[in-house]
Image: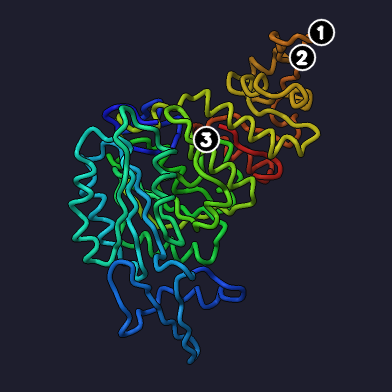
Amino acid sequence: MARRGSARYASHSPEFRRGERAGGRPSPGSAELLLVMSSCQKHEGDSEGPGAAVKRVCRRGGSTVEIMPAEGTSVQVSVIVPVYNGAEWLDECLQAVLDQDFQGSMELSVYDDSSTDNSRSIVEGWRERLEGRGVSMVISGHNSAKPKGVGFAKNQAVSQSSGQYLCFQDADDVMMPQRVRLQYEKAILNPTAIIGCQVRRDPEGSTERYTRWINSLSPEQLYTQVYTSHGPTVVMPTWFCSRDWFHKVGSFDEGGKGVPEDLLWFYQSVRLGGSVLRVDECLLVYRYHQHAATHSVLEETIWTLRVDFLQERVLSQWDSFTIWNAGKQGRKLYRSLSPSNQQKVKAFCDVDKNKIQKGFYTYEESKERPKPKIPVLHYKDASPPFIVCVKLDMTAGVLEETLASLRLKEGEDFYHFN
């Protein structure tokens, strides 16, 4: 996906592409024990260093229980870092890996996707420091004429790693010292989940609306707002999940440049019943810059995937619905629907008097005769369920207040699409 000179393998929000700048495995019944993992200590006399099996001892209610990594591996967490021309940021990224306060066993798995700078030698230069800290390293890559893309690089980094849990990290981002520990504690209780976290944007103020959305979604909205243009409700550079769940969902798409491999994987995880969770602490400095690979993904590609997922997951369950917005975005959604779902649209609704006075929207491109005419109503005269095609956080709270005044429940009476 990355272009020459690009280092980021990033998430795919269209807001980025527009360049917006605003100013051990749990066993049944083990949940109670795992809740106190943060108070566990390494057992005296345990071996340490790369490849050493870390044994942790938890004491609760006078009893002592040993927690070991799964049989066959001594690594609890693999930090997955795909790299393409990341020399500018790698030292800071790898220092943050070194600074993790996680007391379990860690591994760094780096795959170099044919960088033309000295990214691989920089990573190699960190081996002694990281292994001295007990973090084992796996580094590989290829030297083809062109990079094979972020999906390929991530898959290779995962394939060569051995940890029970995977912590995805972009080469140009910086994780906070507590990231692995806090996400691991949440992941062992939720082995079929994608675990995200809150982020701090760098430079400060870049993609302000998108950052606010990432950090403020409620637990319920992590599921209900998966159809919006922002993409996955937990952004890819914050992902943490079990290896078992990753293999259940499947590898990333390796189509290369222009393919939103994170969105495709996220949708498949949701299809399979995977949970979407977030640690509500800022655990990542999330960089925005002009070389981000996300800029290579076209908005229309994202749009088509979103429409298809909405039809599959929501509209297939409804007999009829109203599109909230008789303007450009609402009409575009209508035209993008399958013929059977177009027939389910009973009306558009809006607040614009001029649109309402016209009385209806005529689908001029239709091959039907007569051409479909869809009523345009004031929102007070329309009935749920709604697909809301009004941009979030762009009406000074009026949209949100209006939906609340109608006592509509998100995820039942309406879904946001924009």
Residue indicated by mark 3 = 392
Residue 347, x across and y down, in percent? 74, 24
Which of the pair 296/144 is nearer the observer? Answer: 144
User: Where is 260 relative to 101, above or below?
Assistant: above
**Can residue 274 be seen in this snapshot?**
yes
Cα gap from disc 3 to disc 1, whole angstroms:
35 Å
Which of the pair 312/211 is nearer the observer? Answer: 312
Picture disc at residue 373: 2
Secondary structure of the residue carrying numbered label 1: loop
Residue 87, x across and y down, in percent? 21, 40
Picture disc at residue 370: 1
Q: Nearer the viewer, mark 1 or mark 2?
A: 1
Q: Position of 386 compared to 128: left or right? A: right
Give the quadrant of residue 82: top left
Asked if the residues shown at circle 1 and circle 2 are in contact, with their CB atoms under 8 angstroms apart, the answer is yes
Colour convention of the picture: rainbow
Label 1 CA crowd tier, 10 Å (few <14, some 14–19, many 20+): few
Task: Mark 3 or mark 1: name the one nearer the start of the chain.
Answer: 1
Specify the amino acid type for callout 3.
Leu
